[in-house]
C-alpha cells in the first residue's frame, strides 16, 4: 500500500515537472546554502587553526598595554628605571628562568623607513634576539639569523622577511648587501623563507635586527612584547599562572599586560567559528521554513485542483488515512527531493567557490544529513495541513466539483 | 432477506435560513440479486437518494439497513469502509482518473483494500475482459471512446465483487449504441446474481430492470414490476 502510494505521489510530481521544481526551489536553495556556507566555514576554520599552530609550537605571548616612553626622558638613571606599567629588557629576559620556559624573545617593535639606493619602504621593524626564529618557526632562505654575538655587540645587522627582501632588493640576493634603517646603515645577513599570511596580515614583510640596536633606532627603552616558548612537557596553565604572578609584581596591575597562549587563541577561534556556524545554520533554517511555506502553498493549490480526483478516490473506498498519506507522501517527496538536490548543488557550489577563493572546503556528512532531515521535517509539517484538508473533503461535495 | 431496507429516509439542505427538503420520507426494500431502476424528473432527488444508498452521504433522518446493519448514523470513516467493501459506483461522467491507464483505474479499489499488487493486476484484467476491453488495458481514458470509458468504470465498480452496484444515469453521456452495450453488461451482471440499482429518466433504459421505482419531489409515487416479453 505504501509503495503504491509513493508511486501515485511520484507520478503526480512527475506530471507537473516544472511546477514541482519551482515548489522545491525554496528547499533546494536553503539546503544548498547551508551546505556551501558550512563547508566553506569549516574549511576556513581548519586552515586558520593549522596556521596558528604553525606560528610556533607552545607559543606564549606577553603584551604590555601601556605606551612606551621616549629614551631621552628616562636615560638619566644608570639602571633603566621605567615608569610603572612598563617592562625592562632585564625583566623580559629573566622570564627565561621561569620553570617550564624554553626560550624567550623580547620584542622592541615599531615602524621605520628602509632604503636600498632609491628604493624605500616603510614596514615593521622587529628588534629581537636569536630565539625569535625558533619560537616563531621561521626557516631561513638565505644566510643566517641574528646571533647572540650580534645582540651583545650591538651589531648593525638585519634579517629580512621574504616579502620585504623582494620589495627592497628585487630578484637580487640581499645577503651581505647594505641597507639603511632610518638613515643608519645595516648589513643584511639573512633572508627568511616565506610563511604566508594569517587574518590578512603577512608574516613576511618585516625586518629583524638585534633588540639592543632597535632600542636606539626607535628611541625607546621598554619592551612592548615578549614571545616565549614553553617546554614540550610543560603544564601551560601552571606556567601561565607563574608568568602572570611575575608580571603582576613588575607591572602593578593586571590591566597593564596580557598573557596569551596558543591554546587560548585556538579556543577563541573555535568559539567564534561555532557562533558563525550557528548563525549560518539559523539563516539557512529560516530559508528552509520559507521553502516549506512554498511547498504548503503549492500543496493547497494542488488539493483544490484535484478535488474531483479526491472525490473519486473516496467514492471507491479510499479512507481518510489513505488520502492523508497520499498528500503527505507527496509533500515529503517534494521536500526530500529538494533536500537531495540542494545537497548536491551546495557541494558543487562550495567546491567552485572554494576553487575561486583559493579556500579549502570541508564537506560534512553530518551537516548534509541534518539538512536532509530538516527538509523532511519541513515537508511533513507544512504538508500536514493541505493533506488533512484533502482527507477531510466530503465525497459528495468533492465529486460535484468540475 | 432484503439487501437494502430504507425506512422514512429524509434529507434536507440548509439554504440560507430555510431548509430545502429534497427527500421526504423514502421507504423501500431491495432484495439481493434484484435489478431496480429509479426514475423521476430532473431535480426530483434521484442522485441525492443514490448518494445515501451508496454511503457517500447520510440521511437527515430515517433508517437505512444495508445487509441488516443500520448505517444511517455512521461516521464518514465507517462509511468509507462500507463503500470499499460493499458498493460499486458507476457515474454519468465516468469519473476515471485521467493520469492512470485502464488497468490502473480498475485496480484502484483493490489498492485501497490492501490487495497485493500482483492480484490487483490479475483481477483488474479479468474485470476489463468481462466488459470487453481485454485489449485496451494500457489505454489512458483520453485514448478511449465514451462508451469504452464507461465500461472501464463498470469494470472498476465490479472488480472487488461488491454486493451492490449503483449507477447514476450511466448512459446519460453516451449515444444509443454505446448505451445499449452498457445496459447489456448490466443485464449480464444481474443474470450472474449481481444486485443492480440504476438511476435514469429514460423509460426504455428503465425497462431493462425487474422493477421501476418512480420518485417525484422526494417521494416514491410508484413501484412496479416489469414484465419482460
Ligand atoms: N448540497 C446541496 N445543497 C443544496 N441543495 C442541494 C444539494 N444537493 C442537491 N440539492 C438539491 O436537491 C434537489 C435534488 O437534486 P438531485 O441531484 O438529487 O436531483 P436529480 O433527481 O438527480 O436530478 P437530475 O436528474 O437532474 O440529476 C435539487 O433541487 C438540488 O438543487
Ligand atoms: Mg442526478
Image (tube, rainbow, N blue to C red):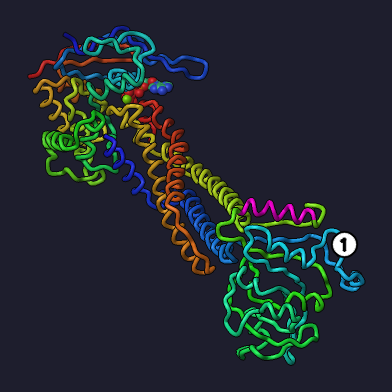
Please identify the quadrant where the N terminus of chain B is shown. Answer: top left
| Residue B177 visible to an observer of this rendering | no
Residue A242 in the image, given as x and y percentages of width and height = 69, 53
In terms of depth relative to the viewer, which is nearer, B162 or B173? B162
In terms of depth relative to the viewer, which is nearer, A380 or A96? A96
Residue B212 in the image, given as x and y percentages of width and height = 20, 16
Residue A172 in the image, given as x and y percentages of width and height = 61, 91
Where disc 1 sits, the SS reads loop
Q: Of helix, strand and loop, which mostly describes the magenta segment?
A: helix
Residue under label 1:
A83
Magenta span contains residue A383: no
In terms of depth relative to the viewer, which is nearer, A95 or B63? A95
The answer as to whether callout 1 falls within 8 Å of ligand 1 is no
Q: Residue at x 34, y 44 (%)?
A: A12
The answer to whether A375 appears left or right of A178 in the picture is left
Q: Total of numbered circles in the picture? A: 1
Judged from the image, the quadrant occupied by ligand 1 is top left
The answer to whether A377 appears left or right of A212 in the picture is left
Q: Residue at x 42, y 47 (%)?
A: A369
In terms of depth relative to the viewer, which is nearer, B218 or A270? A270
The answer to whether A122 appears left or right of B179 in the picture is right
Asked if B174 appears above or below A48 in the picture, the reply is above
Q: Which quadrant would residue B167 be assigned to in this image?
A: top left
Please identify the quadrant where the C terminus of chain B is shown. Answer: top left
Given the image, what chain letter belongs to the residue carrying mark 1?
A: A
Residue A243 in the image, given as x and y percentages of width and height = 70, 55
The answer to whether B209 appears left or right of A371 in the picture is left
Asked if B44 appears above or below A151 in the picture, the reply is above
Magenta span contains residue A244: yes
The magenta stretch spans which residues?
A236-249
The residue most toward the left is: B229
Asked if A259 appears above or below B81 in the picture, the reply is below
Amino acid at each position: 500500500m505504501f509503495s503504491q502510494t509513493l508511486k501515485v505521489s511520484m507520478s503526480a510530481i512527475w506530471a507537473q515537472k516544472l511546477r514541482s521544481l519551482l515548489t522545491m526551489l525554496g528547499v533546494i536553495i536553503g539546503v544548498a546554502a547551508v551546505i556551501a556556507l558550512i563547508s566553506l566555514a569549516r574549511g576556513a576554520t581548519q586552515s586558520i587553526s593549522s596556521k596558528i599552530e604553525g606560528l610556533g609550537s607552545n607559543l606564549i605571548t606577553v603584551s604590555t598595554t601601556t605606551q612606551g616612553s621616549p629614551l631621552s626622558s628616562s636615560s638619566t638613571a644608570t639602571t633603566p628605571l621605567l615608569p610603572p606599567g612598563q617592562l625592562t629588557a632585564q625583566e623580559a629576559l629573566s622570564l627565561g628562568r621561569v620553570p617550564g620556559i624554553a626560550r624567550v624573545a623580547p620584542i622592541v617593535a615599531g615602524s621605520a623607513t628602509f632604503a636600498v639606493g632609491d628604493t624605500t619602504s616603510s614596514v615593521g621593524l622587529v628588534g629581537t634576539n636569536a630565539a625569535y626564529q625558533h619560537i616563531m618557526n621561521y626557516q631561513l632562505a638565505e644566510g643566517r639569523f641574528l646571533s647572540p654575538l650580534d645582540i651583545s655587540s650591538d651589531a648593525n645587522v638585519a634579517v629580512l622577511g621574504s616579502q620585504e627582501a623582494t620589495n627592497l632588493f628585487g630578484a637580487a640576493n640581499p645577503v651581505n648587501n647594505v641597507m639603511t634603517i632610518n638613515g643608519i646603515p645595516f648589513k643584511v645577513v639573512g633572508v627568511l623563507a616565506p610563511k604566508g599570511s594569517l587574518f590578512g596580515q603577512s608574516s613576511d614583510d618585516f625586518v629583524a635586527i638585534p633588540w639592543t640596536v632597535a632600542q636606539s633606532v626607535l628611541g625607546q627603552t621598554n619592551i612592548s612584547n615578549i614571545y616565549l616558548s614553553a617546554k614540550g612537557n610543560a603544564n601551560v596553565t601552571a606556567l601561565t599562572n607563574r608568568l602572570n604572578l611575575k608580571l603582576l609584581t613588575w607591572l602593578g596591575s593586571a590591566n597593564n599586560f596580557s598573557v596569551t597562549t596558543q591554546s587560548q587563541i585556538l579556543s577563541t577561534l573555535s568559539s567564534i567559528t561555532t557562533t558563525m556556524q550557528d548563525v549560518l545554520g539559523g539563516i539557512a533554517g529560516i530559508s528552509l521554513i520559507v521553502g516549506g511555506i512554498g511547498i504548503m502553498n503549492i500543496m493547497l493549490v494542488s488539493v483544490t485542483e484535484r478535488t474531483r480526483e479526491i472525490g473519486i478516490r473516496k467514492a471507491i473506498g479510499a479512507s481518510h488515512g489513505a488520502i492523508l498519506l497520499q498528500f503527505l507522501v507527496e509533500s515529503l517527496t517534494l521536500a526530500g527531493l529538494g533536500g537531495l538536490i540542494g545537497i548536491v548543488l551546495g557541494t558543487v557550489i562550495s567546491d567552485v567557490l572554494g576553487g575561486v577563493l583559493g579556500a579549502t572546503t570541508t564537506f560534512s556528512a553530518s551537516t548534509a544529513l541534518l539538512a536532509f532531515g530538516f527538509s523532511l521535517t519541513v515537508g511533513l509539517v507544512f504538508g500536514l495541513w493541505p493533506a488533512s484538508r484533502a482527507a477531510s473533503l466530503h465525497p459528495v461535495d468533492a465529486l460535484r466539483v468540475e | 432477506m432484503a439487501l437494502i431496507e430504507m425506512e422514512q429516509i429524509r434529507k434536507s439542505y440548509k439554504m440560507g435560513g430555510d431548509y430545502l427538503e429534497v427527500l421526504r420520507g423514502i421507504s423501500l426494500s431491495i432484495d439481493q440479486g434484484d435489478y431496480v431502476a429509479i426514475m423521476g424528473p430532473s431535480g426530483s432527488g434521484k442522485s441525492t437518494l443514490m448518494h445515501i444508498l451508496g454511503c457517500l452521504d447520510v440521511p437527515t433522518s430515517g433508517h437505512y439497513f444495508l445487509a441488516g446493519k443500520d448505517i444511517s448514523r455512521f461516521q464518514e470513516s465507517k462509511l468509507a469502509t462500507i463503500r470499499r467493501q460493499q458498493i460499486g459506483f458507476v457515474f454519468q461522467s465516468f469519473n476515471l482518473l485521467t493520469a492512470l491507464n485502464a488497468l490502473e483505474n480498475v485496480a484502484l479499489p483493490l489498492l485501497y483494500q490492501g490487495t497485493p499488487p500482483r492480484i490487483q493486476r490479475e483481477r483488474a484484467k479479468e474485470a476489463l475482459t468481462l466488459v470487453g476491453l481485454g485489449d485496451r488495458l494500457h489505454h489512458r481514458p483520453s485514448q478511449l471512446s465514451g462508451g469504452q470509458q464507461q465500461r472501464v468504470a463498470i469494470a472498476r465498480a465490479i472488480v472487488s465483487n461488491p454486493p451492490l452496484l449503483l449507477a447514476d444515469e450511466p448512459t446519460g453521456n453516451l449515444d444509443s449504441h454505446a448505451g445499449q452495450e452498457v445496459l447489456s453488461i448490466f443485464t449480464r451482471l444481474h443474470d450472474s446474481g449481481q444486485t443492480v440499482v440504476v438511476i435514469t429518466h429514460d423509460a426504455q433504459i428503465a425497462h431493462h430492470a425487474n422493477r421501476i421505482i418512480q420518485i417525484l419531489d422526494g417521494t416514491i409515487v410508484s413501484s412496479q414490476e416489469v414484465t419482460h416479453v
